Structure formats: structure tokens, C-alpha cells
Image: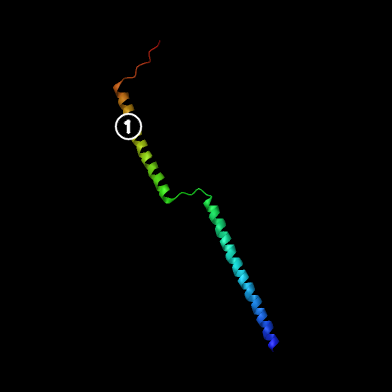
Amino acid sequence: MQSDNRIFDDFVKVLNGAAGTMAGMGREAGESAREHLKSWVGGMDFVSREEFDAVKAMAATARDENDALKARLEALEAKLATSTPASPAPTV
């Protein structure tokens, strides 16, 4: 009877060792995958939210300035068209 318990105890020790090894391998694989993901994402050109918002505001300002300049140009062209009659170009 004593020998049966010893075999059982040895078997349990082997199983515990194998379970510990598997758990360690799982943790190591998870850490490795996490590091690979960090390096992959880190290599991409992502911008922060603050940088995105700053560029978005700059684009909106530029668009507004462009619209204002376009309106000013159209007003000047209209004024020029009404102030001087179209005359043929002088020949030399």
C-alpha cells in the first residue's frame, strides 16, 4: 500500500511540474506577443489627438482665409469689369 502512495505522489509531482512549466510558457508567449504588437504599432505613423486637432484647426483657418480671398477677388473682378469698358487691344 505504501508503494502505491509513493507512485501516486511522484505522478502528482510530475503533473504539478508540467502544469507550472505550461503556465510559464503561456506567460512568456503572452509577453512576447505583447512586445511584438508594441513594436509593430510603434513603427506606424500615428499622431496624438492633440496633434490631429491642431492640424484640423489650421486647415479650417486656411479654408476660411481662402474663402475670404476668393470673395475679395470676385468683388475686385466685378468692380474692374464695371469700371472700364472692354476695348480692343491696341495694335502695334
Question: Vertical placement of 7 versus 61: above or below?
Answer: below
Q: Residue at x 59, y 69 (%)?
A: 23
Which corner quadrant of the image does residue 1 belong to? Answer: bottom right
Seen as rendered, the residue at the extreme bottom is: 1
Q: Residue at x 52, y 52 (%)?
A: 42
Seen as rendered, the residue at the extreme top is: 92
In the image: residue 26, left or right of residue 54: right
89 or 28, which is in the foreground? 28
Disc 1 marks a residue whose amino acid type is Arg
Residue 13: x percent and y percent?
Answer: 64, 78
Count neighbours of disc 1 (C-alpha within 10 A) and say few if under 14, some if 14 to 19, many if 20 or more: few
Residue 24: x percent and y percent?
Answer: 60, 68
Kind of element beneath mark 1: helix
Question: Vertical placement of 76 versus 11: above or below?
Answer: above
Residue 39: x percent and y percent?
Answer: 55, 53
Seen as rendered, the residue at the extreme left is: 83
Residue 60: x percent and y percent?
Answer: 37, 42
Q: Residue at x 70, y 86 (%)?
A: 3
Which residue does the numbered mark 1 point to in the structure image? 72
72 or 4, which is in the foreground? 4
Question: Vertical placement of 89 versus 27: above or below?
Answer: above
In the image: residue 5, left or right of residue 65: right
Q: Residue at x 35, y 33 (%)?
A: 69
Quadrant of the image for the C terminus?
top left
Question: Vertical placement of 75 versus 53: above or below?
Answer: above
